[in-house]
Image: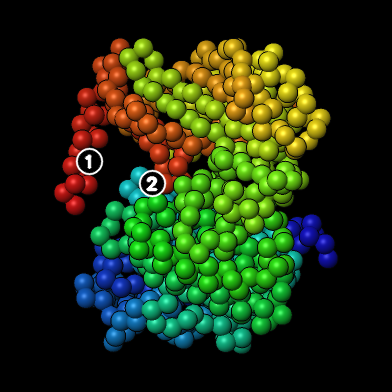
Amino acid sequence: MNAESEITRDTEGYTARHTATPRAEVAVVVIGYDDAAHVTDAVRSALAQGAAVREVVAVDDCSRDGSAGLLERLSASEPRLKVIRRRANSGGCGTPRNTGLDAVTSPYVMFLDSDDVLPPGAVDALLAAAEGAHAEVAGGLCVRRELPSGREVPWQPRLYGLHAVVPRPAQRTRLVHDTLCVNKLYRTAFLRAHGIRFPEGRFPYEDVVFTARVLAAAPRIALVPDRVYVWHVRRTDTRLSISLDRSGVENWRARTEACRQAYEVLLGAGQKELARAARAKFLDHDLRMYVRELGLRDAAYRRAWWELTRAHLAEYDADDWARNPAAPGRLIGRVVLACPEPCDLPRLRELAARPARLYPPYARTADGTPVWSDGIPQVSLEPLRARPVRALPLAVDAELRPGARGTRLRLRLHELYGRVAQAGPETVEVEWRHRDDGDVVVHGPSLTLTPCAASAASAASAASAGMQGADDAAGAGGPGGTAGPGGAAGAAETTGGTGTWSAETVVDLLALAAPGVGTWDLRLRIRFRDGASRDVTAHALTGAGLLRRRAVPSARHGVLLVQPYTTHSGALALRVAPGVRGVLSVVRTRLRRLLH
């Protein structure tokens, strides 16, 4: 049966299931420890799923804050709720989940953490998919909700865009990227028949190993686009969740160990493609995430992290590195392996950004081969020659200067071994995206990038000659540009001798201030001669007068407090606070941070 017919069957099963009276088929295992503030909300969200939920098994991991008492009182009025109190704290999430799984009597089971919730209809959507497709596992979309802002970010949305059925996990290796266990419904008999359980005790990232064990058993999997889980991220809490607390190097040690075990589980089950995909996921996701944060850590952490990473990557073989060799994670991994001590951390941070930015210098060997640097020539960047321009790690600098006469944004696009001149950059479109609501976008100007007469010949030469000698392809030029959709005037030029293109425009602060106090991320789209485009972020330049908070006069608001700053990945972002109330809000926030 082909994929299209699988999707059709799943959609029909979903519709039929939602028009029928649901049967009590599902158990929801809720685990918690010292979370009296949230655990009853989690349990109620499970009970509110309706008649499809036969039982909610709440496992209290020896809490000391009265959580168990709250659950017992709730169970007195809710016969579907069963409370299990563990006598000793396990130190992790795996043991209480196993305890709950052992107590389940329903055909299907889900897992829910005490600080999260199930959105309405989650169980019905997953149960309909599982039964309609005769699947052992059904998965749906999880959203990460940042609190208190309420900003929501979908987790692995590429997997859950449509209803689909995957007869065997090896047919969709992207499944290894979704290591969560909570956005899925499992057939209880399937888990028990294959002895699939969570690692016991204090084992951070236990769901990484659990998911590998599930995939290793080759279940039939149904996927739905419905929101089935809300993952609450409370970074302001005094006690972060186990997975979010990345301040100590032991967290990284635990993550690499979980990924290593996941690989071994998949390989041991004969799932070679999934095992390779799991290693690729580590490079693309885990490694890049931690590299972006290395600048926040002290020297001792960085040395320990580097040593652990080198030991983990030393287990990779030639095939692991040969697949998609120009991918940012693989380039980062090869640099780490090539250097016994931490090196080039600012540049690695840029490459770990999303989208990736490969920052200068752009070194070559004597024969012209692109390499990471003169000091690390063994890391070749040759694969960048064949990478399409829409996927190149293009580097753009951004310099923002707020002022009473206008807030000016200056951009500079770097050459990349002649590939940029070869592709012919024509325009750069500017937009500002609201941090807490990605649907709120302020469009800036579209600037025309026009090489000056002095650089036209060298640019044409680079385009025809390919990579060799193309670092100096772009020359200097005068201003020239067009007003973009936002109506702001802009100018563009190509800088000679350095292989860069620059553009400058005025930022519409009034538009950014309209929603009130907020943070805006800069997004750029570079368009090329053949119609290709590349979406990028911009590296925030530092220096005299840059990244400083300014109070800018405003006829509408009286005053605008403007703060350009650099994100953890080095990108430019902008905080705007309009009016006296906005300024006071910023002051109160800073005071709270200082006091806590």
- The mark tally for this picture is 2
Q: Amino acid at mark 1?
A: Arg
Q: Where does residue 219 sit, x and y in percent of width and height?
A: 67, 75
Determine the residue located farthest toward the front in the rendered image: 366
Say if residue 10 shows up in the picture.
no
Residue drawn at 28 percent across, 87 percent down:
87
Image side of residue 234 versus residue 440, left or right: left
* Relative depth, front residue between 118 and 283: 283
Where is the N terminus found, in terms of image quarters? bottom right
Please tell me how crowded label 1 is: few (under 14), some (14-19), or many (20+) other residues with Cα within 10 Å.
Answer: few
Residue 150, numbered circle: 2
Is residue 594 something one can see in this rendering?
yes
Residue 522, x across and y down, in percent: 48, 33
Q: Which mark is residue 249?
A: none
Residue ID at (55%, 48%): 351
Left or right: 22, with 9 as reference point: left
**Amino acid type indicated by mark 2:** Gly
Q: Is residue 131 above or below residue 442?
A: below
Counting residues from the N terminus, which is met first, the one under dot 2 or under dot 1?
Answer: 2
Q: Nearer the viewer, mark 2 or mark 1?
A: 1
| Left or right of 316 in this view: 87 | left
Q: Eyeballing the image, is 294 above or below 182?
A: above
Q: CA distance from mark 2 to mark 1?
A: 20 Å
Q: Quadrant of residue 230?
A: bottom left
What residue sits right under mark 1 in the picture? 590
Secondary structure under badge 2?
loop
CB atoms at circles 2 and 1 under 8 Å apart? Answer: no
Say which residue appears at 22% left-offset and 47% top-offset: 593
